[in-house]
Structure formats: structure tokens, C-alpha cells
Amino acid sequence: MANFVLVHGAWHGGWCWRDTAAALRAAGHTVCTPTHTGVGERAHQSAENITLETHIRDVCGCIEAEELTGVVLCGHSYGGMVITGVADRMPDRVKALVYLDAFVPQHGQSLNGLLPVALGPEVAQNFLGAFRGSALEGHSGLMAPIPAEAFNVRADRRAWVDRRCVPQALATFESPLLLTDAGKAVKERVYILADNWDPSPFRYFAAKCEGQPGWRVVKMACGHDVMVDLPGELAAELLRLA
């Protein structure tokens, strides 16, 4: 049986994997859905000084505490930044990487630094202005969540997503990812593109991964929150790596 570690994106929490995790567990697999410091059920720990490194350590700590090996590590959206860092620190524990409509960073890159590359400077500025503007309100240092409707989340799930998402530290988007390249030892990689919403920065990463050695690219007809829109179909795709 496989070990799946499902890593959520910005503003979300482990709650968003509920249905996908249930399907994987029903098939007999071990599934962990760690929540990052400051969001989800850990919102009481929210602070402006939380960084990307904090969240990488959250997931590494989960893998270590659960004593997992042969991990299929899946990261959604911002979670792509996190799982890249985790694989760099624990390459011997990771069997495969799945980027679920996610950023695929290199050494020294930050999420906000990648947006102009993936979207173009003008479109990216709209997002950057919103992130930094909301973090300035009350000098909180926290970014307000983007509404589910903007990501074309299925209509009957939007209220749930909006209700559960909470502000997240701007520093998590601004801090660069520091890598040693040890993660390159993980050879099996999948990119899953949510193909039913725009403007999506993730088309850039899917195109970049297409045809590269060790990569498989899959398109799913849904909004950005694939695990919310198509949880069963996502579980079926992940089971191909079990």
C-alpha cells in the first residue's frame, strides 16, 4: 500500500482534501493531509513572520513523525513551492511528486517572483497589488484569501471553501525557496493542470513540464481547486502512482 501526503495551497488547510483522502483511504492507502502553520485548524497560530520555510518544515515534520517512506507527495498551487522544498530535504523518503495546478520553482525563486514570469507583468501586477495591499491593511502582514468564484470552484462548493479559507502571511509568498538540488533524485513527477479557469499561471508550468524526462502532464476539466471540484477523479489519478 502507498503513503500519500497531500499538501494544500494558500489560505486553505488539510480540510480541502477531505473527499480525495477518503477515496484513497477506502482503497487501503495511508493518507496524511498536514495543515500549515497559521491556517485551517491552526489559524490560531497565524502571524506575519510565518514563511515558506515554516511550511516546508511543517510537512517534513509530518513525514518524520509518521515515519513514512515511499511517499507520493502532492502539492496544490502554493503547495508546489512547499513540496519542492520537502523533496530537497527528504529525497530518500519521496517516491513521486505531483504538482496539482501548482508552482514548480527553482532555487532562489519566490511565488510572487514567479507570477510575472507565468502570467506576464501586467496581469501579475493585479495579483501582487491585491496580495500586498491586503497585507498592508492594519499593518497585519496577512493576505486575504481570493474568493472561490475567482478560481471557478464548482458553485455548490464555493461557500464551503470561502468559509474555511483564512488570511495567510505575505512572507510565505515573498520568501525565496532555497534548494541544494537533492530533490532531483526524485525521478517520477506528474503535473496536473486544472483546465477550466483563467487567468491561470499554471498553464505556463504545465507547458514547461510537457515532454521533459520523468514528467507526465495531465489535464482535468475543472476549476483551480481540483480536490474540491473532482475529488474522485483526482484520487483515481493519484492511485496510478500507488
Image (tube, rainbow, N blue to C red):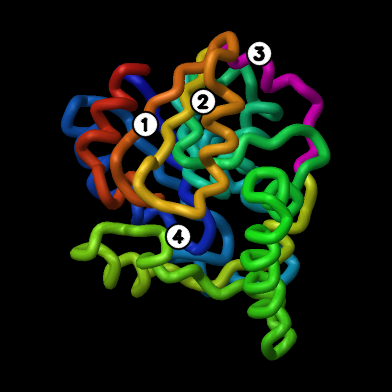
Disc number lying in front (4 or 1):
1
Question: Is residue 9 shown left or right of residue 174?
Answer: left
Type of the residue with mark 3: Ala
Mark 2 or 1, which is nearer the eye?
A: 1
The residue beneath circle 4 is: 12
| Residue assigned mark 1 | 219
The image position of residue 189, as x and y in percent, is 51, 20
The alpha-carbon separation of the residues under discs 4 and 3 comes to 29 Å
Mark 2–mark 1 Cα distance, whole angstroms, equals 16 Å
Query: Which amino acid type corresponds to the residue marked 2 in the rendered image?
Result: Leu
Q: Decide whether the magenta segment is chiefly helix, strand or loop.
A: loop
Residue 117 belongs to the span the image colors magenta: no
Q: Residue at x 65, y 44 (%)?
A: 118
The label number, if any, that marks residue 198 in the structure image = none
Residue 36 point in image, percent of width and height: 54, 55
Asked if the residue at tag 1 contacts the one at tag 4, i.e. Cβ–Cβ closer than 8 Å, the answer is no
Q: Are the two marked residues, 2 and 3, in contact with CB atoms closer than 8 angstroms?
A: no
Q: Is residue 72 above or below residue 134?
A: above
N-term-proximal mark, 2 vs 4: 4
Badge 1 amino acid: Lys
Range of magenta residues? 177-187
Q: Which badge, 4 or 1, is on the more N-terminal residue?
A: 4
Dot 3 corresponds to which residue? Answer: 185
